[in-house]
Image: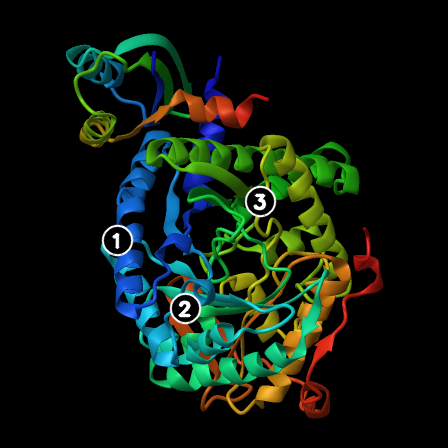
Amino acid sequence: MTKAIITVVGKDAVGIIAKVCTYLADNQVNILDITQTIVDGFFNMMMIVDVTDTQKTFEQVSNELTEIGKSIGVQTKIQLEEIFNQMHRI
Amino acid sequence: MIDLSEVLETNKMVEEENLDVRTITLGISLLDCADDSVDACCEKIYNKITTLARDLVRTGEEISREIGIPIVHKRISVTPISLIGASCCHTTGDFVKIAQTLDRAAAAVGVNFLGGFSALVSKGMTPADELLIRSIPQALATTDLVCSSVNVGSTKNGLNMDAVKLMGEIVRQAAEASADRLCIGPAKLVVFCNAPDDNPFMAGAFHGVSEGNAVVNVGVSGPGVVKYALEQMDRRARENGGREANFETLCQTIKKTAFKITRVGQYVAQEASRRLGAEFGIIDLSLAPTPAVGDSVADILKCIGVEQPGAPGTTAALALLNDQVKKGGIMASSYVGGLSGAFIPVSEDQGMIDAVNAGALNIEKLEAMTCVCSVGLDMIAIPGDTPATTISGIIADEAAIGMVNQKTTAVRIIPVIGKRVGDSISWGGLLGHAPIMPVNTFSSERLVNRGGRIPAPVHSFKN
């Protein structure tokens, strides 16, 4: 299983999660966990997802998520989970 | 499981604190490219580099995209060319031809520098070594991507003072040969003592003869991240008790940060070597600044507590920084090598430039600082009328520090033709800009012209 982490950061608005989740469902990306907080009107979300079954390349998914983020005025990123394990776990 | 605060911390490091992996450097052995004919040798070199490094740039970009952390440079180092050209190069022109081949190969695979136009002459020079050294000014003036280095001494061998003398002349000639290009030649030329075989950083990278066929070495960076961590540490300490954090907390903070930075490099190195089918060599734990604001080693020294780099206490602060970066980094990777220490170039670090302009920092203090950190006098612009023997004297001093302290030291200074103290020079990009710094004007001529070798120090006899 290849796990990745999607972060969405920006001003809170209606339908942010819906848009991102619809895209993931359409591309066979399974959501394993979601964490979300709003601090001072700022939306911070992190999803742990499984990208093993998607037909698209990592680059495509990354570019398309960035575009979706732009369309709703938030910053969206996808990164392999492994890099966070490497940095934050001994 | 990873939590949100950890993810946000990493992304903040990238977006606001200039965290990046500075370079993936693919070391390529060219020992099997030696030939009797220069043209055949050049062809073998071109083919080998463009085959082994074909996917280097693409792989670097792929990994960078997957982890969301920039990998700034993709580079190549090769076996010292004085060895490869020894049987076929009979003139300096022959060596220049190889340099131009390396330049074409580097451009073809899309890397931004290739190091290894080098000679290792810590004890003596073969005719090929001397020819290569004499070809350096022309080689650097007629290529864009090739970097050159010469090792003139070591703790085991002492200092080759004939080579030191010659390199003073070559540094000057390299500046003269590239006078129409802002004297860029010497910015691509490093004179070493105790040069490491596996250094991924330019301009001094070469692929040592003890290395395998193709090896991935990774240089990490991150002065901005360390600076930010120290600022946060002091802010928290002031909020809690009014006093600044003590040295114990300071060291702990640097170590933790260095650990995280190095782990990124370790991951990139493992992935890159796997995808390129090359061995994983080492991680170089160096804090490498860039001219970008906030990406400065000088700023860390200021955070530790000196008003400007160069103020009394600077050497102590740098010694501490260097040691803690290593202690944190060593835990994060089993294979640490290369230069591994803080870099203190002048032109490539805005904080250093400011310190020179403020009158806080001079060459003599920089020399003292090189006793406790990696590299040496780096990217320092000096007056264009500095005599070759004075440059040799500077090289000899720096090499002596390396030889006696069993560490790598290097000199990369640029005599800027036609400029004097008070002027400045701007190369732009990563090389940055530099004020012309004054050099002691008393002569080193008699010392430099003696000829021969300075013997190895007594503590080299360890067997």
Residue drawn 22% across and 16% down? A15
Vertical position of residue B433 compared to residue B330: above or below: below
Nearer the camera: disc 3 or disc 1 = 1
Residue B423 drawn at (x, y percent): 49, 84
Rendered location of residue B214, percent (x, y): 41, 43
Circles 3 and 2: CB atoms closer than 8 Å: no
| Dots 3 and 2 on the same chain | yes
- Amino acid type, callout 3: Leu
**Label 2: element kind:** loop
Residue B228 position (above or below residue B405): above
Residue drawn at x 59%, y 31% is B332
Label 1: state its secondary structure. Answer: helix
Residue occupied by mark 2: B87
Q: What residue does disc 1 label? A: B47
Q: Which residue is mark 3?
A: B285
Label 2 amino acid?
Ser
The subunit carrying tag 2 is B
Query: What chain letter is assigned to the residue under label 3?
Result: B
